[in-house]
Amino acid sequence: MFDRLRQLLLHWLRVPSAPQPPIGAPGSQRIFRAGANFYKLCLLGWVGAQLAALFGLVVSLSLVQTLKNDVAALRATTPAGATPVLSSSPVRPAESPQNRDRRNDGFVRMVSRGPDWIIGGIVLLEAGAVLLYLFALPLTYAAVRLDYELRWYVVTDRSLRIRTGLLTLQEMTMSFANLQQVVVAQGPVQRLLGVADVRVQSAGGGGGDEHERKSGDSLHSGVFRGVDNAEQIRDLILERLRQFRETGLGDPDDHKTEASSGDSATLSAARTLLAEARALRHAMARART
């Protein structure tokens, strides 16, 4: 069932199953995924959110039931055609002070004066909220599961790419030419579950506000979130970064620019030589004549 729901969501949202690999030599691509315990952590947050929503539904249903009982009791103690104001009405012996105080509520008096469809409308809204909650359960679970499954971390010998998101798909590519720092961060809950975050930062990544620095949501930093082999990823990036700098590969775009500049200079020199050769030929032709 989940596989069918998964296919439907990916089709509706038009999410590709895998990202395109970043620039790098053939065979240098390494793919990493978030750890299984990271999914358990996300699932725990989903369960907490659903329990909070369920608690809110139970409280609202109990309030609606109390409102129905109070309105029915208020109408039963009010003569036909009279205004239901209990603050000046005598209290019956069988009525407790607690019930009297609750029935003096202004909202209860307002609803009791209105037509019967008001209570029916409130009950209908609560029923709709329950149905919406039940309908959203599998969808929100699938969203949590897919958000975990669609996290891709790809590393080559020249760059790395991080793809996250479901509703808002985000792919961040960082070249080793600009990479400056690789940090492993692990909170107490992550230590308990055996997962960590690997944060990579490029040149110019020291700016931004405090929220961006904590969450990693910056144009100059990317996060391998919830991986269970953080040290391996860090060592791989540092090793390839060292090899990248030692070989002096540089940014592929820089090579394209340099090649373009070199071709332009060569072409210009060739045109100059051609013009001089033509001028020399014309001069020799005149001398013969």
Image: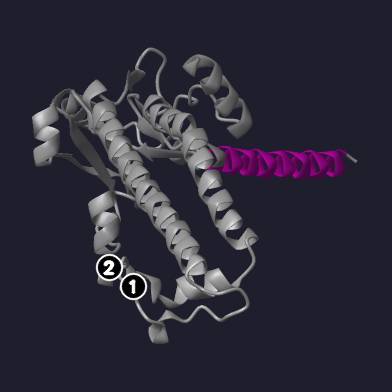
Residue 225 in percent (x, y) is at 27, 35
Q: From the viewer's side, name the closer residue of 40 and 276.
A: 40
- Crowding around mark 2 (Cα neighbors within 10 Å: few <14, some 14 to 19, many 20+) is few
Q: Is residue 277 above or below residue 227?
A: below
Tell me the quadrant of the picture where the C terminus can be found: top right
Residue that badge 2 annotates: 96
Q: CA distance from mark 1 to mark 2?
A: 6 Å
- Residue ID at (40%, 53%): 60
Q: Give the SS element for disc 2.
A: loop
Residue 145 in percent (x, y) is at 39, 27
Say whether residue 284 is magenta. yes
Q: Give the SS element for disc 1.
A: helix
Q: Which residues are magenta?
A: 261-288
- Crowding around mark 1 (Cα neighbors within 10 Å: few <14, some 14 to 19, many 20+) is some
Q: What is the number of the mark on residue 254?
A: none
Q: From the viewer's side, name the closer residue of 181 and 19.
A: 19
Q: Is residue 278 above or below residue 82?
A: above
Determine if residue 280 is in view: yes
